[in-house]
Amino acid sequence: MSEQEQSKRSEGRPELPIERGFPIERVNEIAEKESRAKQYYRPIYTMHKWWARRPGCLFRAITMYSLLDQNTTADDVEVYEPGENQQLGDNGLDENDLVEAIANVDIDDPEPLWDFYPKDIRIKDKKILDPFMGGGTSLVEASRFGVDSVGVDLNPVAWFVTKKQLDAGQTDVEKLEHAFEQIKSEVAEDILEYYRTPCPNGDHDADVMYNFWAKELDCVSCGHTVPLFKDYRVAAGRYENDNKYNVLCPDCGAVTLVDDWQEESECEECDHRFVPKEGNVSRGGYYNCPECGQKEAILDAIKGEEEYELQLYAVEYYCKECDQQGLEKSAYKGYKQAESADKQLFEKAKREWNTRTDLHEYVPEEEIPPGHMTVDRNPLFDHGYSDWVDMFNERQLLCLSKLLKSISETHDQNIQEYLLLTFSETLNYNCNMVVYNPGKNLVANIFKSNSFDPPSRPIENNIWGTASGTGTFSNMRDMILKAVKYAKAPTDRYMEDGDTKKTDNFAQPIGINSEVYQDDMRNITAEDEYDAVITDPPYYDNIIYSEVADYFYVWQKILLENEYPGFDRVKTPRAESIVTNPYLDKKAEDFEHEMSEALNVINRALKEDGTLAFTYHHSDEESWGELLESLCENDFEVTATYPSNSDLNKFIGGEAVAFDIVIVARPMENRRPVSWDSLRRRIVRTARETRDILEEHRELAGGDIGVIEMGKCFQEYSKHHGEVHRAGELMSAKEVVDEIYGIIQDNDRGEQDIYRDLLEEWKPTYDDLNKHLKRSDASEEQMKEMQLFRMDGNDFVLCQWDDEKRQAYVQNKVEEGNGDLTNLDKAHFLRYHFEQGKDPKEYLERWNDDALRELCEGLAEATGDETYLTMIGVDMSLDAFGDE
């Protein structure tokens, strides 16, 4: 049994599977697929946008490996086979098998418990907290194990999204379907009448999928109207034209097919020759007037005119009638020039919006608040946006208000909230901040870059939707219904022999025994209540969620303002958010202080043997030192770290590369003083042993192994935080992190390290020597030559400073003066001279080296000989280094 295991068991704290091993390989092979196809793997997370969601499979695995422990018995769990929901036993893995699997998890084989990943497991009498719940992934996954869960988030949008995910498992699907049909009967035709276009194939109308708009400005020099086209692409060709490109002719305005949009082409309508790649907007945000050649900054021109105009130039259509007639796909679904009828239809919508004042209460009235995302990162106000409604054209405001008014008349509060959630997610693809991806023939959502990025060519979606297209209310309705059905009977997907398998339905619905609160997590008053805190905390300079979430918030609050606290403000909370915010002058030190407050609350809320497991993402080496220091300062011990799609090799090599890590920590009270020499050797030994085990037994990339090594090293350090002595000084966590990176990179263990390791053994033997040599760069022959050990018959003798042969070797080295002395040689020489009553000052001045002082501290600690401290002038007793 390792020293770590002995320590934990002596403290009476049950060891967790996640602390012994975690099946990174299995989790990542699912996560890679799930991240690309949430709608198939876990449709619950497609109900509404939230930023930086972690894969559900990751949090399912974290929960399972964190809530089971070495004290779990068969009475503490239930295991069911999905589908029939019959307790297993003779037909498969049962509770006793689960308990056995828990005990068998290890760093070299963490997968015994993984066999239960696709099983319907219930874990009794456990309670978790997520104080930064965001999109609620941890709570959703925990609820599937039947545990009690509590979530908190400052942002009301996050609260609402998570609430509806957790409510879904108890929601009547038929009622919800009926409500959607009711909405459809009330407003669908009213909305769709504004998304018609003359079909190119006859005297009937087709459905508009997307309207293509372009901003235009008057040239500051000649007054010529300049449409802001960086290039004239509309969309890639499809079907039999998939080797061509649809482009806009800048002369006649036709949408024409060309062979190569980057080469000179000819318009099929007017024979104008042009290069579609060459628009009149150039790099750096300048327009070039085609009439007079004036080059001007677009933002300067907007400021001068105070506003820009929008030109409707193209339409993507779908014609149901032509589809039913059996025409070719490219005939009933394609692109065409915007006609006068299209522009007249928009003007009709505009007139209705301006006269229907009864609908104006169903759009937000708030101004866009200034902030980092709206002023510093992308200056919205410079682009002419001041109110939230400025992000929408009049037809969008008309149709959205009709839709929201109809939703507001739904009497069942829970059902109304799902309709509102559908509406809110529809906003993701329906505003003037949305663009079209011409290469993929589809619309992108407003937050494709996780910020507000005003486009020069916005796309207007069909808000209700037709048979083709994405991002419509109809699309979102289907997603919500699929998610609610999934929540009532979830499934899981996993890999088996290289193939993706899907389980039958689980009987445990999502959301049982879950509570969520909109609040500052620092207001949590719980003490000694939670078995685990499982979360994805804020990253100090990442997305400022409060500012981007306002886009949804101002619409949601129209119906929720009188229903829930938190929806009665003009914007979501800013100053209270634990994140750096340059606009509010919140700096890194503010984040560190606030995160420290949060960790203090978490520690207090956890049971004495509780667990903190969280994901963290950053590319800044300094932030990891700050994180480790913050954890340790708030009485946490890091017990494991695991990678999630990371590459630590690049990071350690000096490249700024973002990566994700799962960090596991446990509360602790007493820390033992230690010399850096002793701790460094322990860290080196731990890193080497960890790497050797992983390389031998696991199929992991070098970067992934490095992350696990780092966690083991952090674990060693966090037992001694604030008590690590180095050359008479105390080391900070940041200093230790710097050293740990070097250790992981170099990982050297030489003869001096092995000798000091053996000093710490109780009556070391020749077998102990060989055990240490196996995972080192040291040589037995070299250690013999240095007189560090000898064999006395069958007895192994570790030579001390006063050993006659060892001292003769050292004295000879000193007399030779050839610079070949090791620090251990110097220390033994000084110790001998000090014993002889000789002043070591001369040699200390000659060998002025912090590494020698560190070594002497380590030797004093390992041997119990305080003279090693006295002779180098350290006024400190051995008690300061503990009793290790």
Image: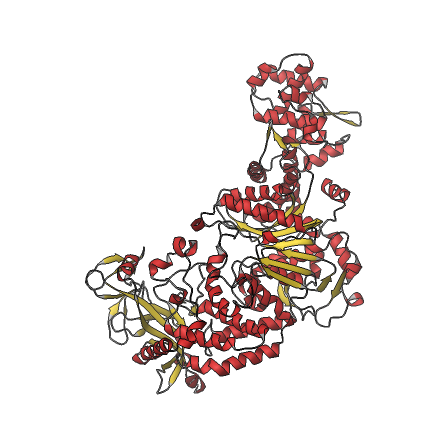
Q: Is the residue 797 above or below the residue 747 in the image? A: above
Q: Residue 791: where, in percent of width, then height?
A: 76, 25
- Residue under the point 42% across and 77% down: 358
Q: Is residue 161 visible?
A: yes
How does the figure colour the protein chain or chains?
Answer: secondary structure
Q: Is residue 393 above or below residue 29?
A: below
Q: Nearer the viewer, residue 357 or 149?
A: 357
570 relative to 42 in the view: left or right: left
Q: Quadrant of the N terminus?
A: top right
In the picture as drawn, the residue positioned furthest to the top comes out as 837
Residue 306 in the image, given as x and y percentages of width and height: 29, 62
Residue 602, image x and y in percent? 63, 50
To which quarter of the image does residue 673 belong?
A: top right
| Pick the front one: 175 or 85 | 175
Q: Position of residue 109 (x, y in %)?
A: 69, 52
Q: Is residue 409 above or below residue 862?
A: below
Say if residue 111 shows up in the picture: no
Q: Residue at x 75, y 42 (%)?
A: 6
Q: Nearer the viewer, residue 380 or 77?
A: 380
Residue at 63% from the left image edge and 52% from the top image edge:
613
Using the image, determine if residue 283 lies above or below residue 680. Answer: below
Quick one: quadrant of the C terminus? top right
- The residue nearer to you, when weighing 12 against 765, is 12
Count up the numbered dots: 0
